[in-house]
Amino acid sequence: MKDNFWGLIWSSFLDIQGILIGFMGVVITIVLSRFPVKTNIPLDLAIVILFFILLLIVTLFKAASKSFSEYKKAKAEFEKLTIRNGELEAKVNRRLLPKILFARQPQGKTGLEIECLLENSELLSNNTFLSFYYTGEDEFERLIGTGVAITVQANGKIQALMDKPVSAYQDILEKLARNDAKILDRTVVKPSITRDMMQNI
């Protein structure tokens, strides 16, 4: 679309003038040959006025048509960009959070505590409180446990411990403790302090 209204009108005029002039020539020839015109207004002036009125109508119609077409195209592009932006934002936000590389149940522990090895992350340091969330098939995240970052290793990877699992998600927790790839992929670790932690302080 042109940058402004008058630019749009001018481009529309240029688009239609060849067709319009040819059409007007044919119409005027037919009209004058079939219907002799008797009027107080000089015929040449009437033709000029009629021509410019028709030219204005067709130009405005063309401009409106182009505007609507460009609007639909721009709207479709905007919707695509909005969807793509949402996808990228979600991807970036997810990648800022460390991925669980490996999970296991600590040796000698009878409860369902889970040790995790996390990717490097500038968000975490020693003793950072952590929340573990599992994203279900319905795309809702569910808190499945809380814990702490035990230590940041020399290579940057982080050892973490989920020491307060949510028992309602026993099946998911057992699969996570067995290092199930699907569960690992759908579980995110976030640095946070939950309301339950605050109540225990």
Image (cartoon, grey):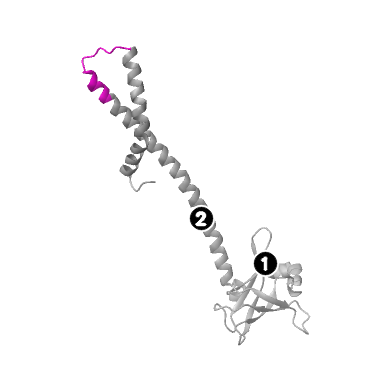
Foreground residue among 52 and 64: 52
Amino acid type, residue under disc 1 in the picture: Arg
Question: Viewer-nearest of labels 1 and 2?
Answer: 2
- Rendered image quadrant of residue 167: bottom right
Say which quadrant the C terminus sits in.
bottom right
| Residue shown at the point (62%, 77%) measured from the top left | 119
Instruction: Give the magenta part as a residue range.
Output: 35-49
Image coordinates of residue 97 in percent, x first then y, are 58, 72
| Residue shown at the point (67%, 68%) measured from the top left | 185
Amino acid type, residue under disc 2 in the picture: Thr
Q: Is residue 64 magenta?
A: no
Question: Which numbered tag is attached to residue 68?
Answer: none
> Is residue 201 visible to us here?
no
Image coordinates of residue 51 in percent, x first then y, are 29, 26
- Number of numbered discs visible in the structure rendering: 2
Q: Which residue is mark 2?
A: 82
- Rendered image quadrant of residue 111: bottom right
| Residue shown at the point (48%, 52%) measured from the top left | 78
Q: Which residue is mark 1?
A: 186
Earlier-in-chain disc, 1 versus 2? 2
Would residue 33 be found to the left or right of residue 185 on screen?
left
| Residue shown at the point (35%, 21%) measured from the top left | 27
Image coordinates of residue 188 in percent, x first then y, are 63, 70
Q: Residues within 10 Å of mark 1 (few under 14, many from 20)?
A: some
Q: Is residue 44 magenta?
A: yes
